[in-house]
Amino acid sequence: MIDPDARAEILDQAALMARPVARLSPETPLSVDVAYAVQERLVARRLARGERIAGLKLGLTSETKMKQVGVREVILGRLTDAMQHDEGSSIDLGRLIHPRIEPEIAFLLRRPLPPDPSQAEVQVCVEAVAPALEIIDSRYEGFRFDLGDVIADNASSAGFVLGRLHPPETDTGDIAITLALSGEVRETGSSAAILGRPLNALAAAARIAAARGISTSPGDIVLAGAATAAVPLSARTRVIADFGPLGRMEIRADGPGEREN
Ligand code: OOG
Ligand code: MG
C-alpha cells in the first residue's frame, strides 16, 4: 500500500532539492485516485510554506504531448503563486532538475467553473484569455513516468508565465504558435490541437476538478495544455514564443548566479 503522505513528501523533497527520484514500480502502478490524493498532499505542503493557489493546469490535452510522454489521458495539476514568473524575466534553472518549456493558452476566470459545463457555460466563466509559457520539470529520473506517477507529481508543474490579457470572447480556437530557443524555431503548432479548441480543455478542467473535489475561484488562471511538444531548457537561452494575434512572449533561462536582468 502506498502512503499518500509519504509519497508526497518524497516528491516535495525532490523538487526542493532539485534531485530526481525513482518512479514507482511499473508492476504496481499508482491508481488515479491515489495519485490525486498524493497530489493533494503535495500541494498542501506548498500551501503550508505560504504559497497560494493561482489556478489549475491541464496536461496531455494534445496528441503531440501524449506521444511525447507516452501517457494518453488528460490530467489536472495545481498552480501556485510561487510558480509564476513575469514576462521578460530570467528564470533560474538552478532550482530545477531537467526543465522543459512549452507554449500554452491560458484562461483567467471571472467565476468558479461549474461541474460539467457546456461550451456556453464555460465561456461565461472567462474573464480574459492570454498566451502563456509553462516550464515543466518532472521529479522522476529520466523524465519518465506513467499516468499515476505524473498525476502524483502535480502534472510536472514547475513554473508559468502569463502573457498579455485579451478580451474573453477572443477566438482562441486556431491560434498559430511558434516556439524559438536562442533564435532557432523548435516547435510550431496550432491551438486547435488542444482537444479541438482550448475552451474544450477548460470544460475538461471543470469536469476533472469536480470529480476530484478541487474548487476554482475568480482570478484563477487555467492553462489549457500545450499544443506542441515541450523543449528541454538549458541555461543562457532566450525563449521567444509567437502566438499570432495574441502576441509574442519572451523570457530568459539562466543558470544559478548568471541572471542578466
Ligand atoms: C506532463 C505535463 C503535461 C501539458 O501541457 O501537456 C503538460 C509532462 O509533460 O511532463 O503540462
Ligand atoms: Mg503544460
Image: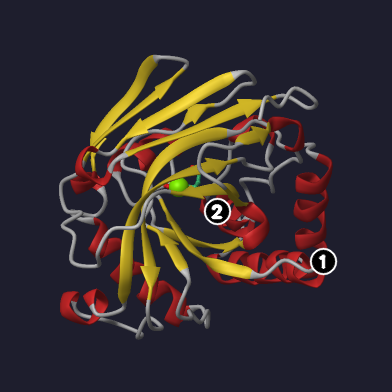
Residue at point 18%, 60% (across, down): 170
Quadrant housing the C terminus: top right
Q: Is residue 164 left or right of residue 46?
A: left
Among the 4 quarters of the image, the one containing residue 195: bottom left
Residue designated by label 2 = 155
Residue 3 shows up from this direction: no
- The residue under label 1 is which amino acid type? Arg
Q: Secondary structure at mark 1?
A: loop
Residue 257 shown left or right of residue 112 in the figure = right
Q: Position of residue 38 (x, y in %)?
A: 68, 66
Q: Nearer the viewer, residue 29 or 148?
A: 148
Q: Which of the two residues, 155 or 185, is positioned nearer the viewer here?
A: 185
Say above or below: 157 vs 88: below
Q: Nearer the viewer, residue 48 or 145?
A: 48
Find the distance from the CA under tag 2 to the CA under tag 1.
Answer: 20 Å
First of labels 2, 1 by sequence position:
1
Q: Quadrant of residue 136?
A: top right
**Label 1 belongs to which residue?**
49
Quarter occupied by residue 144: top right
Callout 2 crowding tier (Cα within 10 Å): few <14, some 14–19, many ≥20: many
Ligand 1 within 8 Å of disc 2? The answer is yes
Residue contact between numbered discs 2 and 1, judged by CB atoms under 8 Å = no
| Residue 175 shows in the view | yes
Query: Going by the image, does 113 lie left or right of 99?
Result: left
